[in-house]
Amino acid sequence: MGPRAWRRCAAPAMVLAVAACGEGPTPPAATRLAITVQPSNATAGAAIAPAVQVAIQTATGATVTTATNALTVAIDSNLARGTLSGTATVSAVNGVATFANLSIDRAGTGYRLVAYTTGLGRATSAAFAIAPGPATRLAFTVQPPGTAAAGAISLPVQVVIQDAFGNTVPTATHSVTVAIRNNPSGGTLSGTTTATAANGVATFSDLSIDKPGTGYTLAVSAGGLTDATSTAFNIVAPLTFTAVAAGGAGQGSHTCGVTTDGAIYCWGFNGRGQLGDGTHTDRFVPTLVQGPAGVTFQAVSAGGQHTCAVASTGDAYCWGRNEFGRLGDGTVLDRATPVRVAAPAGVTFAYVGTGAGYSCGLAATGGSAYCWGSHSAGELGDNSGADQLSPVLVQAPAGVTFTTLTTGFFHSCGLATNGVVYCWGANASGQLGDNTTVDKPVPVPVGAPAGVTFATLDAGYVHTCAVTPAGAAYCWGDNGSGELGDNTTVGKLVPTAVQGAIQFALVSGGGDHSCGVTTTGKGYCWGGNEAGQIGDNTTLDRLVPAANAGNLTLSIPAPGNGHSCAVATGTSATVYCWGSNAHGQLGDGTTSPRLVPTRVAR
């Protein structure tokens, strides 16, 4: 019996004295919080109205009107990473705390508030949303790339229309104009310089500046909005290429090109150092190969996971993966920068080709071929059956010398001085063209139609193509995707005419497709097109040659592993690429596939 429930009064006996003596019952205990006025949807930076209210309640839900606890509210669910402003701690009056000036700065959905105080637990609100405020300013979300070639800004520049708190205003449709702000070289900005915002975003996809310079900036403006200025970027003189090569294996592809000053640039997958820049980092734009001091190059070939090139001195250099000795330096150590091939004394090269696990070179004089690396299917042509860590002589038939040499994935071919093609190595799909599917450890003549000789030659991964002096193209070997261009998907064991009556200057083989350029510089591709490597703005396989989109004049086709590249002729001989781009092998600064020829970023 406690003193607050019972007391003795002036009466002859102890009696319950609540009524007689004026003692009231114990007030009900506060046990919990409840949000009685929920937060409603609001605009960024504006007060949430009506004001949020939190009650201190008993276990049965009655408000404890005598409670004066200090209550605090905070954001509980905050996917938009907003900040709560206003008076977030309020003392209850009559058991209720009123939060009259709460606001949140970041637009988003699914916000929840939580109210709490010591000893009474937490109460969580219903979900609510914060909408963007009125449009007040512009901001760059995709800046110009740090370095771009004169004549092209590789990445689309994007600008958003924002409210005062940095939220994109998706209903804004202002016309946004871009111009050069800091102009160190007096350059001219070309392209579409005014764009209408869609969903609050204005995209400028074809901007270019004509003069090299350091520290350019762009400015964007729109009526009634605060301007924005981009980060600084540089414009460099565009690279001018004389040759390009596309390679790769599995999901990793890379591309390399030789410039007019004898430098090599590579881009794309670099997992084994095949870009030659001393790293294993993928590159999305052309990156300079770190060759030995003073060495300049005249030719390059991109293999499965390695690259080889010929220096102006005729020395061959290779880099990347070196399993089986494919780099030819006498070791099996991977190299992230070029190493000199250990050629026989006195042998220099006019050309080198790269396959899956091997390489070959055409001697600069005498027409002999040398190969090194893996000998899994006879692709070295030396009839030894053994891997070779440095170049060995291909055992060509007596009197046969070569003017052209090409390497597929596991087979090799050479064009003899009399226009006859000889091939050796793997032949499971008929890629040697000798009307069999038997591997050959030494060169054998291709079974061309009677009277047909060839002027150019190039091997794909599991097929081969050649062009006659009159410009007729023939292909043979695997044809699962239509890469032979004969309007079928049936493999051919001997050279078969490419359909279309097109007069080609060059035809080259890739992974599951082929590409060629005509005598007038028109580009065509055919075969597999799952990644857009045909360049006709579709992903449909083509069983006969399909013209590349655009009006480019091309000189050197280079189909690779799911992508294609070519040198465009003109005053600035740059490279265009298209198709798969998972590792940046198109060189446009992105990893987005392209269905049409797209200029590399340099």
Image (spheres, rainbow, N blue to C red):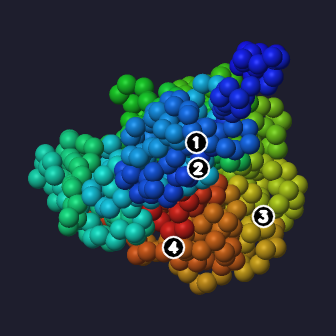
Q: Earlier in the sequence, mark 2 or mark 3?
A: 2
Q: Give 420 or 353, whichever is nearer the viewer.
A: 353
Closer to the eye: label 4 or 2: 2
Q: Is residue 82 visible?
A: no
Task: Using the rendered view, name the quadrant where residue 274 is placed.
Answer: top right
Q: Are marks 1 and 2 in contact (CB under 8 Å)?
A: yes
Amino acid type, callout 4? Asn
**Which label was assigned to residue 55?**
1
Mark 2 secondary-structure assignment: strand
Q: Residues within 10 Å of mark 3 (few under 14, many from 20)?
A: many
Label 2 sits on residue = 36
Q: Residue lying farthest front?
A: 12
Left-right relation of 548 to 151: right
Amino acid type, callout 3? Asp
Label 4 sits on residue = 548
Query: What's the CA distance linking mark 2 and mark 3?
Result: 74 Å
Q: Give 53 or 176, whichever is nearer the viewer.
A: 53
Label 3 sits on residue = 478
Amino acid type, callout 2? Thr
Amino acid type, callout 1? Ala
Q: Residues within 10 Å of mark 1 (few under 14, many from 20)?
A: many
Give residue 456's position: percent from left, percent from top: 57, 63
Give residue 571's position: percent from left, percent from top: 27, 62
